[in-house]
Image: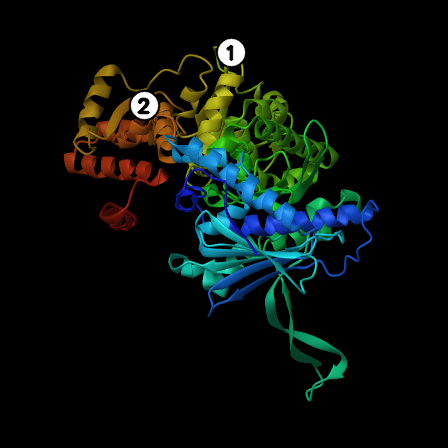
Amino acid sequence: MQKGKINVQTENIFPIIKKFLYSDHDIFLRELISNAVDATQKLKVLSSMGKTDVELGDLTIQVTLDEKKKTLSVKDRGIGMSAEELDKYINQIALSSAEEFVKTYMGKSDSDKQALIGHFGLGFYSSFMVSKKVEIRTKTYRNDENCGAVKWVCDGSPDYTMTDIKDLERGTEIILHLSDDSSEYAQESKILEILKKYCKFLPVPIQFGNEKRWETVEGEKDKDGNDKRVEVEKARIINNIVPAWTKKPADLKDEDYKEFYHELYPMNFEDPMFYIHLNVDYPFKLTGILYFPKIKRNFEVQRDKIQLYCNQVFVTDSVEGIVPDFLTLMHGVIDSPDIPLNVSRSYLQSDPNVKKISSHISKKVADKLEELFKSNREDFEKKWDDLKIFIIYGMVSDEKFYERAEKFCLFKNTDGKYFTFEEYKAHIEPLQTDKDKKLVHLYTTDKEEQHSFIKSANERGYDVLMMDSPIDMHFINQLEQKFEKSGFARVDSDTIDKIIKKEEAPSSKINEEEKTKLKGILERNVPKEKYHIEFESLSVDDMPMMIVQPEFMRRMKDMAALGGGMPFAGNFPDSYNLVVNANNDKMIALLNEADETRQNELVTQYFDLARLSQNLLKGEELTGFIKRSIALIK
């Protein structure tokens, strides 16, 4: 037996490792299994190159938990280590790295400490975060002299023992004696949770005990004539060693992609709309599959669905700031050996390789969408309502994506017809250019609520766009900056003839003196603090009164509600314009009505009708309007 002291200057290095190495202690198991996978893969490479003639046999990595003894072991049948290698790789290299980490972390922030970890070989020593004692039992694949099995034990102090042992097969087993404050890792459910999170797609089979499952017995029936099913105990294999993204696209069918999607997201029962298979070798290596899900209106809940991997080892599913923000609406997997494994998210965000990968993915997404648009526009239009938020979010948040997407981004009008930007410009330019040569895009946020205003616009030959997603206000602001001599106005933001001014307004049937008198009648019945009364010379067929909300103020409030724009605008009280049609015969009749009580009844009725058209009449006031209307009918 060999006794020794690990060559470190810092006597209390293990408590420091336990406290500062990783903020998430679960990662210790990922590190140990990643090392086991590396050892197994190295042996497979040596065998394939003819460098060894050992029989590979079953290479499954075994994870074993003894809840009573509070031990957890990870065992592989990889290349193993000799006593000399164990001393070199464990006693010297790993701990010298740990000591360097200790020296370097002093005075650093938490994110800086996490960023440093990737520069040191600290994977094995992460086991001391949860253990009071760690054993290594290992035997090299080589049959040279002095290559027998060896056992290494360390209790968390700089002292260790190394002992020659007998009857050990090739490979390495690491046994953790869990500490009292890490008892959660002595629970099967906890270990299973970690394995499924971090090891789901590692390239070597990982077994964690057995599981019971029901299987059909081929050729046998039960007493009711149904296929006979029996309960059997099988090895519980954690991982899919050849996930879809590691295969060639030519070897996969649509069903394979859908099946893998549901493997990634077992609780998502909807199929994705389509996917992109990434496969890049230069200037960086990148593989993966990204899926376009059906995005709901409340797109915030769609975040954190892309999973980031490094050589099939799970890194994170919190990718905001790592990939462009709009891509977080997508689902899927990105795998690259150029992504640092043991670093914080803030470090990943500043890593140059990650930035290149992010830019490349954005371009591939745009290319795929353009390809779909060009190859089958009809199908693209059918998917537009589900794609719209994703594409618009990308255009608003990423200038390069906007430049690519303006070729296939679509406008949809109230008739359900679709147009590219150029197509729509040609469609509305003849009629919706005002007297100042400005092209006016009319839009609605609610086809039903704003129906009377849409109808008024349509009667003049104008077209109205649907802009009903949460992000459309931001998009409209962007388009107004991009489109030359163009503007957007909600169809109920003013009278239609004032939104698109063609010529001087027609003459009014009511003179200024009569307007003053009529305004006084109105003010007796209309709350002045909320409604500003103004007269317009509209068509005789237009409503006697209508309520509009100025485009600027309403847009600012909408943007404040979503987040962005002017946040204080959300605190402004609602204010509206009450537009009185100076050419409507009912307003002239109201002016000439001698009975003041009758005047007040008519004003209230016309005013309530205008409020009703904007969904502003509610509660007690709505009840009063209904009763009054019934009385008028009688």
- Left or right of 222 in this view: 630: left
Q: Is residue 481 above or below residue 187?
A: above
Q: Does the rendering let one see residue 77?
A: yes
Please, what is the three-letter code of the amino acid marked with disc 1?
A: Lys
Q: Position of residue 15 (x, y in %)?
A: 39, 46
The residue drawn where x is 26% and y is 39% is 605
Q: Earlier in the sequence, mark 2 or mark 1?
A: 1
Residue 437: image tag: 1
Name the residue beneath numbered marker 2: 582
Q: Do the residues labelled 2 and 1 touch (CB within 8 Å)?
A: no
Question: What whole-number distance in Å separates the C-alpha atoms at marks 2 and 1?
Answer: 27 Å
Q: Position of residue 348 (x, y in %)?
A: 52, 33
Mark 2 nearby-residue class (10 Å; few <14, some 14–19, many ≥20): many
The quadrant holding residue 334 is top right
Q: Where is residue 449 in the image (x, y as percent from the top left)?
A: 41, 40
Q: Is mark 2 on a helix, strand or loop?
A: loop
Please, what is the three-letter code of the amino acid marked with disc 2?
A: Ala
Q: Position of residue 80 (x, y in %)?
A: 67, 52
Mark 1 nearby-residue class (10 Å; few <14, some 14–19, many ≥20): few
